[in-house]
């Protein structure tokens, strides 16, 4: 695959409020070092300055819908988007340093279908597992974009009759190297593979009963407890669902879950970007701690220009990721793309 770097020069509209213990106070403003007024979101020990439109894109480049975000071991931030109509470059992955300076970009072959972006540390190296909803495929690459393999839905799963029924949204990797693929926009199956990308099993399938999912949009292997747990953002069922790594249902998490999209952890803390205009923090027992940046809902907003977005409020959070200091990067499903850095207040 040819790396194609940029030139540096060139649903669910809910009323009401969160439970009293985690109610997100209206945002307030604080001045940063440059004197710019930044909104503060959250409450108590979980307060953050919201730096909207973070990162300096090269001249002439604009985002499309921002779908994925990850922070690598070097602290570089990787943003995956569908590529905007006004962009002069077709790369789907854009990389910034910790200060928001553009570093490189790649992924022209994922233009238009870019979705899940999972970062996996395997030995001394790091890799990406990518989902392409437009091409109905998923792939593994290096951080520079070199493709190692690309796959479609497993032939062993009899749930598919034609290629476009498989629409993968996200991938999670277990400590032993096995990985799980969520068919979030297709048949709602979850497929497991071994470390060599050999098919093992499928489970889930569309429904609301324990063990079934309806748009398993995101998933990750949660290592905060005594045993690894596969946690699934069961979005259209308005819940998280926990499974063993053998695909057996454990339980549900429903408190403060409206349309959960994905998650990431930092220590005992988990961040859950929720399409219903909010970002939720939960503890290791999956109890809500804070709701950040609650907005009015994405209907009527997500296709608007940036001047329609209220500072300190989210429109449609789609993915979120902690950096090494506990700050949070949030990307949103809006036509113009939106990257927000939530800077932790000490």
Image (tube, grey):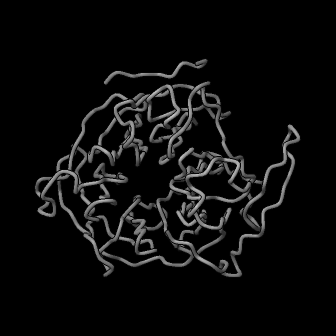
Count the numbered circles shown. 0
Relative to 11, 56 lies left or right: right
Q: Nearer the viewer, residue 208 or 300?
A: 300
Relative to 2, 233 lies left or right: right
Measuring from the top left, give residue 100's x and y in whole percent.
Answer: 65, 34
Q: Nearer the viewer, residue 268 or 170?
A: 170
Kindly identify the residue that appears in the image at 42 percent across and 22 percent down.
Answer: 4
Residue 85 lies, with reference to residue 322, above or below; the image says: above
Kindly identify the residue that appears in the image at 11 percent across and 53 percent down.
Answer: 155
Relative to 145, 76 lies left or right: right
Q: Nearer the viewer, residue 39 or 289?
A: 39
| Res 18 quadrant in image | bottom right
Image quadrant holding the N terminus, namely: top left
Measuring from the top left, give residue 232's x and y in whole percent.
Answer: 39, 65
Kindly identify the residue that appears in the image at 44 percent across and 71 percent down.
Answer: 240
Kindly identify the residue that appears in the image at 71 percent across and 63 percent down.
Answer: 46
Measuring from the top left, give residue 73's x and y in whole percent.
Answer: 52, 37
| Res 244 quadrant in image | bottom left
Relative to 231, 40 lies left or right: right
Residue 172 lies, with reference to residue 255, above or below; the image says: above
Residue 306 lies, with reference to residue 280, above or below; the image says: above
**Can residue 40 be seen?**
yes
**Can residue 346 be seen?**
no
Measuring from the top left, give residue 213's x and y in whole percent.
Answer: 32, 71
Image quadrant holding the C terminus, namely: bottom right
């Amino acid at each position: 695959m040819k790396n194609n770097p940029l030139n540096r020069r060139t649903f669910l509209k809910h009323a009401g409020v969160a439970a009293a213990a985690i109610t997100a106070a209206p945002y307030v403003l604080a001045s940063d070092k440059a004197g710019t007024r930044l909104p503060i979101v959250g409450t108590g020990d979980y307060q953050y300055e919201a730096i909207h439109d973070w990162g300096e894109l090269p001249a002439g480049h604009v985002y499309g819908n921002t779908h994925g975000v990850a922070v690598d071991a070097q602290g570089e931030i990787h943003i995956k988007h569908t590529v905007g109509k006004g962009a002069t470059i077709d790369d789907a992955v854009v990389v910034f340093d910790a200060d928001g300076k553009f570093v490189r970009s790649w992924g022209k072959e994922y233009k238009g279908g870019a979705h899940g972006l999972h970062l996996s540390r395997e030995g001394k190296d790091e890799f990406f597992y990518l989902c392409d909803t437009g091409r109905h495929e998923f792939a593994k690459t290096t951080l520079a974009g070199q493709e190692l393999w690309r796959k479609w839905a497993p032939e062993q799963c009899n749930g598919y009759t034609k290629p476009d029924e498989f629409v993968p949204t996200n991938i999670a990797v277990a400590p032993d190297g096995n990985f799980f693929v969520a068919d979030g926009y297709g048949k709602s199956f979850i497929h497991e593979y071994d470390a060599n990308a050999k098919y093992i099993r499928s489970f889930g399938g569309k429904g609301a009963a324990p063990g079934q999912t309806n748009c398993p949009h995101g998933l990750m292997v949660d290592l905060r407890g005594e045993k690894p747990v596969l946690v699934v953002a069961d979005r259209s069922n308005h819940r998280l669902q926990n499974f063993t790594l053998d695909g057996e249902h454990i339980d549900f998490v429903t408190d403060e879950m409206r349309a959960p999209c994905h998650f990431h952890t930092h220590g005992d803390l988990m961040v859950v970007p929720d399409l219903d205009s909010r970002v939720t923090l939960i503890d290791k027992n999956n109890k809500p701690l804070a709701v950040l940046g609650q907005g009015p809902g994405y209907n009527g907003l997500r296709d608007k220009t940036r001047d329609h977005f209220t500072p300190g409020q989210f429109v449609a959070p789609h993915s979120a990721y902690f950096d090494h200091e506990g700050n949070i990067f949030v990307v949103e499903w809006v036509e113009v793309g939106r990257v927000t850095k939530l800077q932790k207040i000490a």
